Amino acid sequence: MAEAVTVLTERYTRAVDLARTLHTETRKGTTIPYLAHLLSVSALVLEHGGSEDQAIAALLHDSAEDHGGHERIDQISTAFGETVASIVHACSDSLAHDKTDNPPWWPRKVAYLRQVASEPLDALLVSAADKLHNARSILRDYRAQDDELWGRFNKDAGRVGSLWYYTRLVEVLGERLVEPAAADLVAELRRTVDAICAHARSLGHDVEAEQAEGRRLAAEY
């Protein structure tokens, strides 16, 4: 039996345009338009069996977190429906209207991991695609820049926090995304994170000790 084909309608076109107008910034520490990340995440969702709603949510997954908080969620619900809005909400680790009001990095990421452990599966596919594209970008830049890379990350996270966070994401997502297409995406995320850790070891870092330190810091929250 042939798999159903996801049909993209004018809703998807409108979502691309909204993402384009909201995200005029570049990826942190690069000259790459932020829209490239959003299109890549949406493509990963479609390549791994996602629906149009999930693909639209992938385009908009950072819009509330980065540009408008709860008001943006309301706008997305009106324009694209409650399913898309709920996925965007689930993919956001903060909905502060002003990003300077975000909670500190460690409690925010610990809370997000708890959220991932229970959020709906349709949102998890989008979250996994987002993390995979992020991890691929980290691996590429880490190989090019070595430890200089971590200077562009939140100062409270650095290498220790970032590698702990992505390792935990692989574990949590792997426990929940077991359907073959989604599980393939998580497997690719695992391989990418393993490669990041391998490069850290090649630079002389004791990744296992740093992971233990990450677990200790996370346990405080």
Image (cartoon, rainbow, N blue to C red):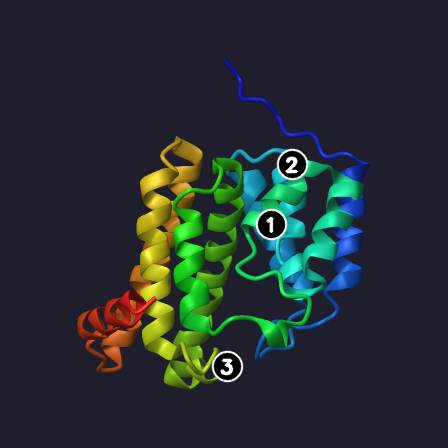
**How far is the residue under mark 3 from the one under mark 2?**
34 Å
Decide: is 178 above or below 206. above
Q: Residue at x 34, y 48 (%)?
A: 172
Q: Residue at x 41, y 67 (%)?
A: 107
Decide: is 48 above or below 88. above
Circle 2 is placed at which residue position?
A: 83
Circle 1 is placed at which residue position?
A: 89
Task: State which tag comes first along the sequence, 3 or 2.
Answer: 2
Task: State which tag comes first along the sequence, 1 or 3.
Answer: 1
Residue 123 image position (x, y, % from top left): 53, 42
Task: State which tag comes first along the sequence, 2 or 1.
Answer: 2
Q: Secondary structure at mark 3?
A: helix
- Comparing labels 3 and 2, the label whose residue is closer to the camera: 2
**How far is the residue under mark 1 from the one under mark 3?**
26 Å
Circle 3 is placed at which residue position?
A: 152
Q: Are marks 2 and 1 in contact (CB under 8 Å)?
A: no
Residue 149 image position (x, y, % from top left): 44, 81
Decide: is 13 above or below 201. above
* Residue closest to the far top: 1
Q: Are marks 1 and 3 in contact (CB under 8 Å)?
A: no
Can you say which quadrant of the picture contains the C terminus?
Answer: bottom left
Indicate the amino acid at tag 3: Arg
Give residue 212's quadrant in the image: bottom left
Indicate the amino acid at tag 2: Thr
